Amino acid sequence: MSVLKTFFKDTIIYGLAIVLPRLINFLLVRLHTDVLPNEGYSENTEFYVVAAFFNVILTYGMETSFFRFFSKNKDKNTVLSTAMITIVLSTLCFGILLFLFRVPISETLRINTDFYNLLVGITLLDTLIVIPFAYLRVTGRPVKFAAIKLINVLIIVVLNILLLSTTYGSDSIRNLFSVANNVEYIFIANLIASAVVLVLVLPYFFKAKLKFDITILKQLLNYGWPIMVAGLAFVINENLDKWLLPEMEGEFVNGAYSACYKLAVFMTLFIQAFRMGAEPFFFNHSDKENATQTYASILKYFTIVGSLGLMIVVVYIDLLRPIFIKKESYLLALDIVPIVLLANLCLGIYHNLSIWYKLTDRTRFGMYISLIGAAITIAFNLIFIPKIGFMACAYATLIAYGLMMLISYLLGRRYYPVPYHISRISIYLLLSAGLSFITYYHFDRNMLLGTVFLLIFIALVMYLERKEVKMLLNRN
């Protein structure tokens, strides 16, 4: 139980480091949807879709590789130094290529040249800070990690308000930049914030004595390249819809879809917070006694919390939605929210299950699974967007993540058996999804009935988990 307490403590700290800044950043959705037309919000979304692809390519799985080999290698200084030197050199090379071929690349990606220059700048800066942030996580320095993350998002928020807000904006600051489109202010704010963060983490570039080991580099790259491919597949699963919709349904529809997709951010934040604490924990505790039992308990509790989150957001969506999205033109795609929430919960379970191929150094399986998900996403979207519009995008995401979750579980039973509480997990997942969908789609978001369903679900959890609850209460 003490190991679980350590895990949950670390996850909460790292969770605050991720959730609080991103929640603050999420509040900008209201500002952006108030100021920008649907088409402008669509441009903003497409910009960050491309940025996501660039980030995966430029980091090429190095973050997870660093976790793996820093944890198990006795010469940690060499691992840190090799990873740092590699990332810096490759980033500089990529940056030169992206700049030299900016015209054909920007035209291919449907991004104007001004936006593209900002995109490259943000991507390069964010890539350089990957290893310093990974070092903070793997060495257990959550407070420093959280502080820098918070500074980053506060800069973004303050600059967005000063540059975009009609009430609190500053003409003197706006005049410092020559922009043809208000959405460009969002990218400028991001670029400045990323530059400040790089300055803050610069000392960590000198933590290790310069030492480059070609053998360690080969290990890092061999372990990491399948993760990069899996990352690209994940970006496709997560963002292809927002890339296809402008072409197939128009920028207006994509703006609405992208804004409503953001309402699933609560599940996304929960998953990201969990991963920040879980990934280094899984690696550091893989050789501990009863490690697999610990992993099994973690997945069960993850599913309980995620299922509760799913129901809470769906049941009270009419209270939450006006806080973040007020313009009626953006509510066109509100019906995707329950589906996207469930899809992200399946993704979170998949991330839990993925420990088997990470701990057994079979990262290629993660690549294969992600590619299967990407193939489903591409095919489903291309076939069904013309038939049912943006709802096809939400269904594609759910089907892809659901299948990835199932495949990972089945393969994990063979290569790294973990005694997961499958019956309990299935009950919680299916019941929360069923009650949420009934509340939203059949009873037209009836909040009173949804609250009753939520209380029934909580009562069931308390009953089934009564032994663990009693143990926790007795300890306290």
Image (cartoon, rainbow, N blue to C red):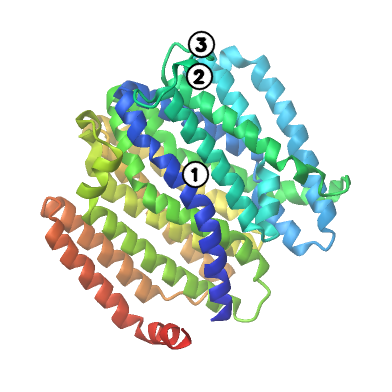
Instruction: State left or right for residue 125 relative to residue 164.
Output: right
**Front label number (2 vs 3):** 2
Of callouts 2 and 3, the N-terminal one: 2
Helix, strand or loop status at disc 1: helix
Kindly identify which residue carries mark 1: 234
In which quarter of the view is residue 200 placed? top right
Kindly identify which residue carries mark 2: 173
Q: Residue at x 84, y 52 (%)?
A: 78
Question: Would you say residue 250 is visible in this rendering?
Answer: no
In which quarter of the view is residue 160 placed? top left
Which amino acid type corresponds to the residue marked 1 in the rendered image? Phe
Of callouts 1 and 2, the N-terminal one: 2
- For the residues labelled 1 and 2, the Cα–Cα distance comes to 38 Å
Q: Position of residue 360 (x, y in %)?
A: 65, 64
Helix, strand or loop status at disc 2: helix
- Does 311 appear above or below 266? below
Kindly identify which residue carries mark 3: 178
* Front residue of 5 and 63: 5
